[in-house]
Image (cartoon, rainbow, N blue to C red):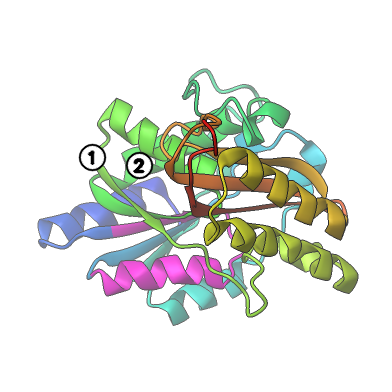
Amino acid sequence: MEHLTTLAQWRAFTDEQRRSGRTVGFVPTMGALHDGHGSLVRRAVADGTVALVSIFVNPRQFNDAADLAAYPRDEARDLALCESWGAAAVVTPSVEEMWPDYPRTTATTVSVAGITERFEGAGRPGHFDGVASVVTKLFAITGVANAYFGEKDFQQLAMVRQLNRDLALGITIVGCPIARDHDGLALSSRNVRLSEPGRAVALAFSSALRAVEGSSLDATQARATMQQILNAAGVEIAYADIVHSDTLEPVEADFTGIARALLAGLVDGVRLLDNAEVTITARKGA
């Protein structure tokens, strides 16, 4: 496995793969890797691509300097995991190369309207602009490739799809299923911050999703069911909604068909996310 550290090495690596007739499978991460990231790398390898992982803690998507400072970093561990998963190369660019003006404000910002304004975007002003800006730069450096994203951060995935369509960046976006632990908890680098009782509470997220996934509920009933389960467990709910999968607009009361259930809340002071595809029935009497 190659370890690349500069943008020049990164571009040279991906250019060489394409010249040789190979497809690059790009997995962008911020490190603190876990098996959820591993599932993305393994998928890239299984698809026959040359798996390239980026590890870059992007300061522009943090609203709080303390959160940025506290973000876990263990490069040696992350590199070893990537090699075990079959990555062909890992790139760990410096902040100085990625954002030469940092910590001053970078003049260019990429913003995706609409899809970023609710849910995670509502409480974290500027977060998605930071994500959109870094993803655009990651894609520009990598060039034509498949890019693998987990569905756990579903709003981010929807934004990246919109960004790629709007700017014709030449990337094939591959959404991959949420990786879960044995007890159903969605894998996240934040899970290590949960106490044992907190982890038990956090299982309410997957329980709430299971309660509506195989049910015959209308949108109003599905929202209420998820809220009841989270409240009963002691989750401090940020949102529990049923939305259109492409626009993330909340579905109407008389909606019927395939939608997305989105959940977020605080457990032990840790913000957790989860989601699932759900089938919603028409409201009775509608």
* Mark closer to the observer (1, 2): 1
For mark 2, does the 10 Å Cα neighbourhood hold few (<14), some (14 to 19), or many (20 or more) residues?
Answer: some
Q: Which residue is mark 2?
A: 139
- Against 34, residue 160 (above or below) is above
Identify which amino acid the numbered label 2 is placed on.
Answer: Phe
Q: Is residue 276 left or right of residue 142?
A: right
Residue at the far top in the pictured view: 107
Magenta segment boundaries in residue numbering: 25-47
231 part of magenta stretch: no
Is residue 57 in view?
A: yes
Q: Is residue 232 left or right of residue 158?
A: right
Residue drawn at (54%, 58%), measured in percent from left and top?
A: 213
Label 1 sits on a secondary structure element that is loop
Q: Where in the figure is residue 88, as x and y percent of width and height?
A: 34, 71
Q: Which residue is mark 1?
A: 170
- Against 166, residue 164 (above or below) is below
- Against 25, residue 125 (above or below) is above
Residue drawn at (66%, 68%), measured in percent from left and top?
A: 185
Identify which amino acid the numbered label 1 is placed on.
Answer: Gly
Mark 1 or mark 2: whose residue is earlier in sequence: 2
